[in-house]
Image: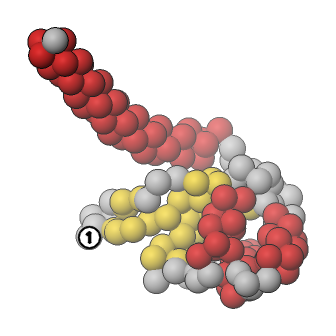
């Protein structure tokens, strides 16, 4: 009976350890796939416009485009703050979430949160999420801890990717 119990315990321990190993590998694969998807998406979708919120444009037309992208980012930041501040009023928060969803190409638009950036430009991201889950997270937490770092839009002006950075 003792041998059987020890074999069962050993088997359970092996299963738990292997599940942990697979979870770590799948997170790494997801991060690598996200990087690969970003590279291929930029090559395959030339109609997307990427705007870095910290860079400045030199030409007049770039300033016009950047201005509209900054307006999108400011409007989005206002929605995020309003959703976070109306966490006690669920109906108001849900109404703001529905209004903000209209700015996105779909509710599954990826949201990447930068948690650190090295001096060589390498960024470390938190676990990827989508915009609908992120806005519900803001509603639940009641505070907006991230700033908008980059907004990627399609040719219709809808947001196709959003990068945030910790404040």
Toward the viewer: 158 or 102?
102
Mark yes or no: residue 25 visible.
no
Q: Can you give x and y, in whole percent of width and height, for residue 83 in the image?
A: 73, 79
Residue drawn at 86 percent across, 67 percent down = 98
In the figure, 123 relative to 20: above or below? below
Q: Residue at x 28, y 67 (%)?
A: 118
Q: Which residue is mark 1?
A: 119
Q: In the orientation shown, which residue stands out farthest toward the front?
A: 1
From the viewer's perspective, is 68 left or right of 22?
right
Please provide percent x and percent y for residue 19: 34, 30
The outermost residue toward the left is 3
Q: Residue 18's image quarter?
A: top left
Residue nearest the viewer, comparing 20 with 162: 20
Left or right of residue 47: residue 27:
left
- The relative height of residue 121 versus residue 167 in the rendered view (above or below) is above
State whether residue 83 is above or below residue 115: below
Quarter of image, res 5: top left
**x 43%, y 59%: residue:** 126
């Amino acid at each position: 009976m003792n041998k059987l119990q020890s074999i069962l315990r050993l088997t359970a321990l092996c299963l738990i350890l292997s599940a942990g190993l697979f979870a770590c590998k799948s997170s790494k694969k997801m991060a690598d796939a996200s990087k690969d998807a970003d590279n291929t998406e930029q090559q395959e979708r030339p109609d997307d416009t990427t705007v870095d919120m910290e860079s400045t444009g030199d030409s007049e037309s770039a300033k016009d485009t950047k201005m509209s992208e900054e307006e999108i980012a400011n409007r989005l930041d206002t929605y995020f703050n309003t959703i976070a501040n109306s966490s006690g009023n669920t109906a108001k928060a849900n109404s703001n979430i529905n209004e903000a969803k209209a700015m996105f190409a779909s509710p599954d638009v990826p949201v990447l949160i930068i948690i650190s950036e090295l001096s060589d430009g390498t960024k470390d991201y938190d676990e990827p999420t989508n915009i609908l889950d992120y806005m519900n997270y803001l509603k639940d937490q009641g505070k907006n801890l991230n700033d908008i770092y980059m907004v990627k839009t399609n040719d219709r002006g809808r947001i196709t990717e959003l990068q945030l950075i910790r404040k």
